[in-house]
Amino acid sequence: MQAPIKIFSGSSSRYLADKIATSYGIPLGKTSILRFSDGEFQPCFDETVRGRYVFIVQSTFMPTENIFELLLMIDAAHRASAYKVIAVIPYFGFARQDRKDKPRVSIGAKMVANLLGAAGVDRVITMDLHADQIQGFFDIPVDHLYSSAIFVPYINSLNLENLVIASPDMGGAKRANAYAKFLKTGMVVSHKSRDKANVVGEMTIIGEVEGKNVIILDDMIDTAGTITKAADIMMQKGALSVRAIATHAVLSGPAYERINNSALQEVIVTDTIPLKGESEKIKVLSTADLFADVIKKVYNYQSISSNFII
């Protein structure tokens, strides 16, 4: 007889874990956190996990405290004799630190992978890593999901003529090319230079956008400097409309102001990170059904290949 399954949530992702558990068809497991006056905290499972498959949902935006809470929950589950502990990390923080891009810096994504392994996690389920090679930082199975299963049906529902897919930078060209091939559309690339992190210098659009409905694709929107600048330039070059699609709505600093004041007609994101502000331009699509389906397939030892559109 297979061990029963339980789904729990860290404090940062309860809004999403509730929807995942509902979609799966089981109640969300009960947890609590004891917080000390000095800021130290201790998460606790308020029901038995002995002999269970334990799935812990926790995105690591504003990453440090959320990562450590996830590590403590993994450790607690193992010490409570869980059969398997699987971390469901819709947004994987520190993923931009995937290599040494200058002297004397850490590779943060590798360190986080090491910490998760040291805590005793048996498997990781995540979505749209900033760099695909991060999967190789783990010595355990990693199910890397793509939001194309959510975004492609939405793009098709728009019924846009003269559609073109755009990448906001050279690093995202592979993603944009995959969408363009699948949707049988053209593709353009924005070439940018950065003076420093989160600050865009010069930008050039490579490709034709005049008379086109443009969709800019990215894995995340942080300060929104790149996407809004690209949208403004594309409209100046004669684009009919510009939309942005990104999986992770980090949206820090001046992001909301930039989006509201930009030429972007619409920004479509997922709920891997909850919105911190409001904008009539932002539309949120849920990942809950996708994660619930993958959890069910992982639990039943089934292939997840059908969840990949592109």
Image: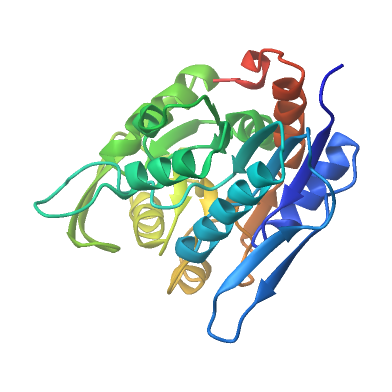
Spot occupied by residue 135 in the image (x, y as percentages of width and height): 42, 29
57 and 16: which one is in front? 57
Spot occupied by residue 232 in the image (x, y as percentages of width and height): 38, 58
In this image, 43 relative to 234: left or right?
A: right
In this image, 236 relative to 67: left or right?
A: left
Q: Please report the residue visible at 82 percent of the width from the left and 57 percent of the height from the top.
A: 46
Q: How is the image coloured?
A: rainbow
In this image, 308 relative to 24: left or right?
A: left
Extreme residue in the left direction: 103
10 and 292: which one is in front? 10
Q: Please report the residue visible at 51 percent of the width from the left and 56 percent of the height from the top.
A: 67
Quarter the C terminus occupies: top right
Residue 146 falls in image quadrant: top right
Quarter the N terminus occupies: top right
Q: Is residue 64 above or below residue 182?
A: below
159 and 83: which one is in front? 83
Q: Is residue 305 above or below residue 102?
A: above
Spot occupied by residue 285 in the image (x, y as percentages of width and height): 69, 46
The answer to whether residue 217 is visible is no
